[in-house]
Amino acid sequence: MSDTPPTAAADADDTPEMPKPQVREFAAHSIGGGLALLLGLLGLLAGGGAVIAGVTLAKDGSAGAGVFLVLLGILLFIGSVFAMSGLNMVAPGEARVVQLFGRYTGTIRTDGLRWVNPLTSRQKISTRVRNHETAVLKVNDAYGNPVELAAVVVWKVEDTAQAVFEVDDFLEFVSTQTEAAVRHIAIEYPYDAHDEAGLSLRGNAEEITEKLAVELSARVQAAGVRIIESRFTHLAYAPEIASAMLQRQQAGAVVAARREIVDGAVGMVEAALARIAEQGIVELDEERKAAMVSNLLVVLCGDRSPQPVLNTGSLYQ
């Protein structure tokens, strides 16, 4: 394990620069589906009626008029079915990306029944807020110590055109870029900073997660995705060094506690001597003061209860 501090480059802005998007979302031309549905049903009824009327005329001897009505009814029926294929039911939190012969013609975000050109193809995209939680990743921190960490990211699709056309699979893209961002942040900072002024994964969780959100936003921006929040859900040393690091943390805690105890004991002894001198309780020469300080420090700083010793003679014996 190396104790070399991380370089200053850890704070540099080295987020990847993604290519500029070639297409942006805009609203597709669509109309209310209620009127289109009504016209389609009327066309179906008219087509069926024309076929029935044509068959009736053919039986009555008007073969030409009957054939014409039958053909007209079939065309009306096929045309109505074809027109009704342009109907789309859009639920709240969903959108439809519309293409005409491979060309992007807009996105339908208005919920309800909508009608567009039947020749177009429509792809459903969810615009709801989603969660993505990474697996527990094992990486080396800035000091070279193996650590385990995982993160959860809250995100949503903001530009449906970019999500469909700029990347192959925006779900896989977000998953991969999230893992890459978490790994990159982990290797830039130590788990515990030896320098109190430096950032660490454990001691500066808020600052680190903010940096994670900034880097992740830059990575997934090309896919039309907006990062709402990101948090670390798991952070620990790898099992092979966990026990050694635990002992180190415990030793540091013991040293810090002892330092606090000593500082408090010295303050109490100082206050006791000042109080005795101020109130004139007893005259203490330097040797008596030294003995008193020694006894008080032993009592206050000892990790065991003191065993009192009664002195029945003189202090100097």
Image: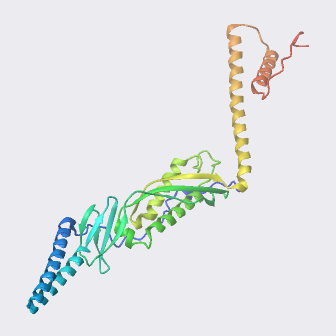
Front residue of 147/152: it is 152
Q: In terms of image quadrants, where is residue 58?
A: bottom left
76 vs 276, left or right, is left
At 82% from the left and 17% from the top, the residue drawn is: 287
Front residue of 192/122: it is 122
Front residue of 47/287: it is 47
Question: Residue pushed farthest right?
Answer: 317
Image x and y of residue 56, in percent? 12, 84
Front residue of 90/167: it is 90
Query: Can you say whether 306 is above or below 29 in the image?
Result: above
Q: Is residue 20 visible?
A: no
Query: Can you say whether 178 is above or below 250 in the image?
Result: below
219 vs 259, left or right, is left
Number of numbered labels in the structure image: 0
Image x and y of residue 14, in percent? 50, 62
Image x and y of residue 91, in percent? 32, 61
Q: Is residue 195 visible?
A: yes
